Image (tube, grey):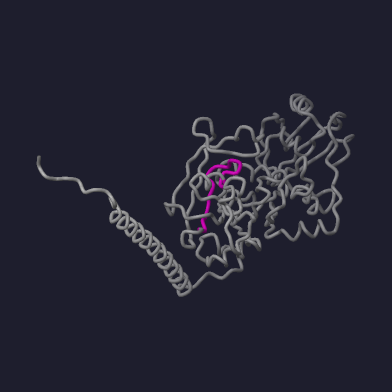
Amino acid sequence: MKPADTVRQFTVTQDDDGIRLDRWFKRNLPQIGFATVSKWARTGQIRVDGGRVKPEDRLEAGQTLRVPPGGEAKHKKAPRPKRELSESEIAEAHAMVIRETPSAIVLNKPPGLATQGGSKTTKHVDGLLDAFVEDEETPRPRLVHRLDKDTSGVLLIARTPGSAATYSKRFSGRSARKVYWALVVGVPEIREGTIDAPLAKQPGTGGEKMHVDEENGAMAKTRYRVVERAGMRAAWVELEPLTGRTHQLRVHMAAIGNPIVGDGKYGGQDAFLTGAISRKMHLHARRLIIGTPESKGTGGKLDVTADLPEHFAASMEALGFDPALSDASPVRDEAPERTPAEKKQAARRHAKQYRKDRRGERKSRTTSALTAKKKAKTASKGKGKGKPRPDRRKK
């Protein structure tokens, strides 16, 4: 920025295209308050392409903005200083990157790492974002959405204030599509559907836990689909949140009787499987599809997937699940599209596994039915044993 004691000329960047004049000052010259901006606009000291302008007028990329000298408010906070990170922290931040665009940095957040800090949380994604600030002219990247600490997967970071505003609108307007993978205990009775259950903070938990509240809860909807199942023991499901409530996916799956594997908070001890299955949370933000600021008006979208964490991949293998069966799998640019023969082969494997599961289920039901029938027969034989037979003669 130019010294404040001279008239300054600024060119509106693409990142600020469509922004209001007063918002432009808040974003680019935060030391100048709204009252000063209003006064300058009223007296004609602020000019856009030589013409007068109002605080609520919107700017266009390429326009020239004239700003008079002075106007800095002494009470305004200084810009946040860059946090000094260790070499290991910088390496950790860059190791999470799976895609970079002019407007975004897309990370694959590992499980166990919080998105933001708290009273007892000192290590988090937000604290590592200074690793992407190259110099004083580079704006600090910003979070535009979040994942739970134990949830892994796609996390989008906006590079600039303008792209942060655009992406935030995409998320709040529900135009962004998010697909999660989860392993759940048992198998949902209906293989595909929508869970519509309002959610609210559970009293007595300090807001740390949510629950279904039909009367006072906020609307919450989740679309789900069972991709594969391991008998009746567990299932692999795709989850797509249609709203963005806290812990929504976890509460909804527990509400239909199929808690996410490893989610003791909402599933209790029933959320853990025995054997080789990890006790960690099995919820992963697999895919994100979202419109980008640079593709404004063209319909272009950012489409990115995140690899599974080690424990999730191991559980998938242990349960015999084939990752290729999900629609949220082949979206990398370098991944070749499967041939018709490969698709048929995958479909045959899926059908074979499904028939195997059904045979096991039918066998289990038949065995249970025969056992029940045998018990009933045994009980009927012994019924009345040792008791005198009733006299059925007419009197």
Residue range in magenta is 235-250
Q: Where is residue 22 in the image (x, y as percent from the top left)?
A: 72, 32
Q: Locate residue 323: give its quadrant.
A: bottom right
Q: Is residue 301 visible?
A: no
Number of disc labels: 0
Q: Position of residue 322 (x, y in %)?
A: 53, 67
Q: Can residue 8 be seen in this view?
A: yes
Between 67 and 150, the one nearer to me in the picture: 150
Q: Position of residue 259 (x, y in %)?
A: 54, 50
Q: Which residue lies furthest to the bottom in this view?
A: 341
Q: Where is residue 234 in the image (x, y as percent from the top left)?
A: 51, 58
Tell me the quarter of the image containing the C terminus.
top left
Tell me the quarter of the image containing the N terminus.
top right
Residue 191 within the magenta-colored segment of the rendering: no
Q: Which residue is drawn at 44% across and 49% down?
A: 193
Between 304 and 87, the one nearer to me in the picture: 87
Q: Which residue is drawn at 77% across and 31% down?
A: 46
Q: Locate residue 11: give its quadrant.
A: top right
**Is 46 situated above or below 307?**
above
**Is 32 situated above or below 104?**
above
Q: Residue at x 85, y 37 (%)?
A: 78
Q: Locate residue 75: give its quadrant.
A: top right
Between 197 and 84, the one nearer to me in the picture: 197
Between 278 and 149, the one nearer to me in the picture: 278
Q: Which residue is drawn at 53% across and 65% down?
A: 321
Q: Is 213 displayed left or right of 110 in the figure?
A: left
Q: Is 321 displayed left or right of 93 in the figure?
A: left
**Is 325 situated above or below 32?**
below
